[in-house]
Image (tube, helix red, strand yellow):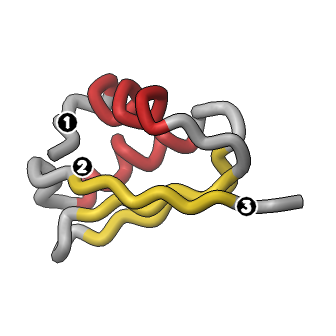
């Protein structure tokens, strides 16, 4: 099974709470198998199958953050 990887820039993340909120929302998206947040670079790297950028952006928005 192929795995897709998508990295999104989320400049508003500043702390562990931000990281947890984004991981929880994005992790609930269908097809997502992994979410890695790098607070230093403000990147969210999502792995899974059939990833849809718009759906992931909506999940990050639901967590209270904007994608750059």
Label at residue 3 = 3
Contact (Cβ within 8 Å) of mark 1 with mark 2: yes
- Say which quarter of the image contains residue 45: bottom left
Q: Is residue 68 above or below residue 28?
A: below
Structural crowding at the residue carrying mark 1, measured as other residues with C-alpha within 10 Å and reported as few (<14), some (14–19) or many (≥20): some
Contact (Cβ within 8 Å) of mark 3 with mark 2: no
- Taking the view exactly as shown, the residue that stands out farthest to the bottom is 40
Report if residue 49 is visible in the image: yes
What's the CA distance linking mark 1 and mark 3? 25 Å
Structural crowding at the residue carrying mark 2, measured as other residues with C-alpha within 10 Å and reported as few (<14), some (14–19) or many (≥20): some
Q: Earlier in the sequence, mark 1 or mark 3?
A: 3
Give the number of the mark in front: 3 or 2: 3
The answer to whether 34 appears left or right of 35 in the picture is right
- Depth check: 15 or 61 in front? 61
Residue at 45% from the left image edge and 65% from the top image edge: 36
Pinpoint residue 31: horizontal percent, then vertical percent.
70, 40
The answer to whether 6 appears left or right of 34 in the picture is left
What's the CA distance linking mark 3 and mark 2? 26 Å
Residue at 11% from the left image edge and 54% from the top image edge: 11
What's the CA distance linking mark 1 and mark 2? 9 Å
Give the number of the mark in front: 1 or 2: 1
Q: Which residue is mark 1?
A: 65
Give the number of the mark in front: 1 or 3: 3
Pinpoint residue 7: horizontal percent, then vertical percent.
39, 60
Q: Secondary structure at mark 2?
A: helix
Pinpoint residue 32: horizontal percent, then vertical percent.
64, 46
Pinpoint residue 8: horizontal percent, then vertical percent.
32, 54
Q: Which residue is mark 2?
A: 18
The answer to whether 22 appears left or right of 6 in the picture is left
Contact (Cβ within 8 Å) of mark 1 with mark 3: no
């Amino acid at each position: 099974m192929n795995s897709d990887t998508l990295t999104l820039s989320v400049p508003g993340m500043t702390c562990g709470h931000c990281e947890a909120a984004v991981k929880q929302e994005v992790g609930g998206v269908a097809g997502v198998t992994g979410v890695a947040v790098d607070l230093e670079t403000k990147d969210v790297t999502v792995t899974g199958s059939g990833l849809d950028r718009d759906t992931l952006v909506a999940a990050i928005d639901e967590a209270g953050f904007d994608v750059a």
